Amino acid sequence: MFLDFHISLLLLTCGVAFFTVTMQPNEHRLARLVLCSTVALTILIYLDWRTGLVWHARPEQVRGVGWVWYFYVFEFVAFAEFGLMLFQISRMSDRLPQANKYERQLRGMDPDLLPSVDVWVATYNEQPSILEKTIIGATNLDWPEGKLHVYVLDDGRRDWLRQMCAEYGVRYITRPDNKDRKAGNHNHALTISDSPFIMSMDADFVPSPNFIYRTVGFFDDPTVAVVQTPQCFYNAEPIRKNLGMVPFLPDELDFFYRVMQPCRDAWDAAFYCGSAAILRRQAIVEIGGFVTVTDIEDQATAVKLLSRGYKTRYLNEQLSVGLAAESNAVLHDQRNRWCRGSLQILFTDFGPFSRNGPRFIHRLLFLQTHWLMSSVTPLTYLLCPILFLWFGWNAFPAANATDILVIPVLTSITIIAAVLWLSRWNFVPFFWHGLQLFMAFELLPNSFASLIKPFGKPLLKINPVTPKGAAASGKRIDFKTLICLITVAVVVILGLFRAANSDRLGGQSLEMATLLFWITYMMVIVLIAALICFEPMYHRSSERFNLGNEAGVLHSGEFAWPVNIMNISLSGARLRLQDSSVVDLNRHLHVDFELRNRHRIGCSVAYIADKNEIAVTFDPLEESVRQALIRDMYANESLQRQQFPRLQFRPVIRQLGRLMKNL
């Protein structure tokens, strides 16, 4: 009767969650509050049930007492971490109306009265093709001449980059050493540039022309020190690319940039992310410059600004596009550095545990518990079936099979349904859990090592910068992670055979069915993590963008035919002929066609896809045409916004089925 009461309550909360997301499918403040409250109540019901199991279990019902208590405490800590996230996303800011108002005001002002803005492009080892796009985007910013100053901050001291800067009319800055990495590079730039506002861009980020007009108005409030915008990417990160789901899944960082940051902004706790942001020089100078004691200068600088009474603002509008981690190796390097740098903040004199640190809400939201729990959680849940199958250690003593099946399932369904809505469908269960598991084998030892030795030479090797372009090539297969996952799968399978032949489960069909259900759930996550380990070959020399069948004209001699441009890159395009009967194409034909701004580009037919679709390779581009194409593609906000997919359930399931079939 005691357990039936919990099931009844969970059925009620599950019903409330489904009713809310069904009746209010779009963003609504009250619906967000109802869902967060419903999930919080669901968690409390589940934890009450778990507490009853542990405290009312008889000694003979408990096997592996250390494991039982560890798992009980772990779930409380894990749900506390989840509750903190739930608290954050219970509110969400929308600063688009403010940005619209500020832009109207700024565009109506006398240009001579607008403030000067320094654009900083920090670089270390990026290749020319990457930096060229960023420099073109920076010089293409819509801000009065004489009020915009572009600086390329080169810690690589490269002569070819100095020459490129001279060709584009931007200032090239270097320094005698690389002390304090990017933070030191920025602090050196503080001594050279002098505008009141600084637009910070990484070397691979291309800003939209209206970036400054959309952001600088927020500094009318003298306490605002940073205005951050989302970091969006023109290439697919490893999880979507490796799984072959680029068109069907959102970018895995979209949940952070599209949900967590605007929600943190509602609590005045959004933070600077190192790029796609604009900062107040005076505020940075007052805190002694960019923070150099941590491996990540961005978040640490934001926390120090908050601790000194400044505010941060987050504008949830795509105003730039950059390069995501290009391989598994780069992804591991990036997240290991983020993890160590975030945990280092805990030990600073302005962090959440310092005497003169930020306000309580900031202390709470910068606890950095995510970096530890995101690794511990998937590995702990994997241990559950393994320890039960091999040693009979049941983390749920005194519970019957029905309760172990129904109560966690109802809890999980309620949480998943609510979080899908709260995340605006940017959080995808199974796949993001698979990514967490994939990262856990690297992040867990790094997080513990960072807590043991937060400063000085790290105990585990961490790349100080994120490799880009040619430097970002991976190993095709992440053998270290794959071996760990295969070991887990083998141990579970052997444990199943062992348990099936034991007296413990012999003839107990319901217990075995419950066990198989949860093992299947976990093994799907293991499978997704394993599939992420395999990187496909990538043959394109540059990223290709979908133009949505934009109209163009195909020329051959004195003839011209209308076409639809399906997609385009700096090296070629795919075209659809509106009438394939009017031209006899072959792969040796030389053609040219007109693009977005009526540029004529010579090209050759690479291959014929079918009777009315062809792929063409561009001839070497004139410099003016190349620059125009970069502006039209990379610095085009509306075009780039079209590249980012929404979650599509059916294609995702079909692709996952194909991947499993090919194993």
Image: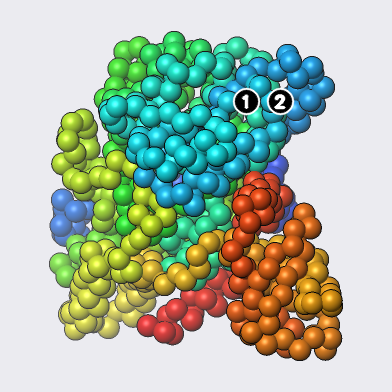
Measuring from the top left, give residue 521's x and y in whole percent.
40, 69
Instruction: Specify few, some or many for label 1: CA neighbours under 10 Å numbering under 14, 14-19, or 20 or more.
Output: some
Q: Quadrant of the C terminus?
A: bottom left
Which numbered marker is on residue 530? none
Q: In the rendered view, would you say 281 is above or below 649? A: above
Secondary structure, mark 2, is: loop
Q: Which residue is mark 1?
A: 148
Q: Quadrant of residue 137?
A: top right
* SS at mark 1 in the image: strand
In the picture provided, is 643 more to the left or to the right than 461? right
Regarding residue 426, the answer to whether it shows in the image is: yes
**Quick one: 576 or 45, which is closer to the camera?**
576
Disc 1 marks a residue whose amino acid type is Leu
Q: Residue at x 16, y 60 (%)?
A: 63
Q: Nearer the viewer, residue 617 or 37?
A: 617
Estimate the x, y position of residue 40 in percent, counting from the top left.
Answer: 50, 42
| Location of mark 2 (residue) | 144
At 52% across and 76% down in the image, what residue appears?
655
Residue 315's image quarter?
A: top right
Visual colour scheme: rainbow
Give the x, y percent position of residue 518. 37, 68
| Picture coordinates of residue 478, whole percent (x, y) | 29, 65
Q: Residue at x 77, y 54 (%)?
A: 597
Q: Residues within 10 Å of mark 2 (few under 14, many from 20)?
A: some
Camera-nearest residue between 633 and 14: 633
Note whether 25 is above or below 356 in the view shown.
below
Cα distance in 3D space between marks 1 and 2: 7 Å
The amino acid sitting under disc 2 is Pro
Left/right placement of residue 189 relative to residue 23 reads left
Q: Are marks 1 and 2 in contact (CB under 8 Å)?
A: yes
Q: Quadrant of the N terminus?
A: bottom left
